[in-house]
Image (tube, helix red, strand yellow):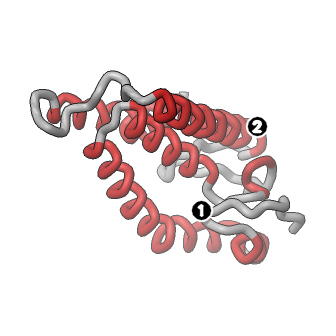
Amino acid sequence: MGILKAIIILPGSVIVFIPAAIIWASLGTKWAPLYPSAALSLLVFSSLSLLLGFTLAIITVKLFKIKGGGGTPAPWEPINNLIIEGPYKHVRNPMLLGVYFILFGIAVFLSSWPIFMWLVVFFAGYNTYTVFKEEPELQERYGKSYLQYKEGVPRWIPRITPYQG
């Protein structure tokens, strides 16, 4: 139940509830979304972004469940094991990267500047949280192994070759 609660509260709010509120608030304005964007290239581009985002989200949640040693992706119930497998060998925050790709895909699919601005605001806020709260806590919890991982794997832009540790 813990992981389901974490998924509903965190990515559910970010990629479903807040964008739905943004869409509702923008109806009847010049910022209203298009259903869907008229350009085929934008449909393809947004679909690829959504596919990549959901793939990263699903893979990382599965890794948390299988390799996390208990806990959830939520900060109030963190996992017990440092995961350096799959996409975590390329980027330190693949789950959030997936969320960013999903929001970007939604914004492009609907040609919605307000949802794109939500993505920018969310990225800025979460990046601040990551730097000042999450990473220090991970360093405290996992010590030297996290510091080595942090030095070898970028926060947001994936490395091409997998981290070997």
User: Of helix, strand and loop, which one carries label 2?
Assistant: helix
The front one of 38 and 61 is: 38
Asked if residue 93 is positioned above or below residue 132 in the image, the reply reads above
Which numbered dot is residue 66? Answer: 2
From the image, state whether disc 2 or disc 1 is nearer to you: 1
Please tell me which residue is depicted at 64% across the width and 73% down the height of the picture: 139
Q: Quadrant of the N terminus?
A: top right
Q: Position of residue 97 (x, y in %)?
A: 57, 51
Q: Is residue 164 visible?
A: yes
Amino acid residing under circle 1: Trp
The front one of 81 and 26 is: 26
Label 2, label 1: how far apart the Cα atoms are: 23 Å
Alpha-carbon neighbours of circle 1 within 10 Å: few (<14), some, or many (≥20)? some
Q: Position of residue 63 (x, y in %)?
A: 73, 41
Q: Position of residue 64 (x, y in %)?
A: 68, 42
- Find the residue positioned furthest to the left: 28
Which numbered dot is residue 28? Answer: none
Asked if residue 138 is positioned above or below residue 114 in the image, the reply reads below
Residue highlighted by disc 1: 156
Asked if residue 66 is positioned above or below residue 141 in the image, the reply reads above
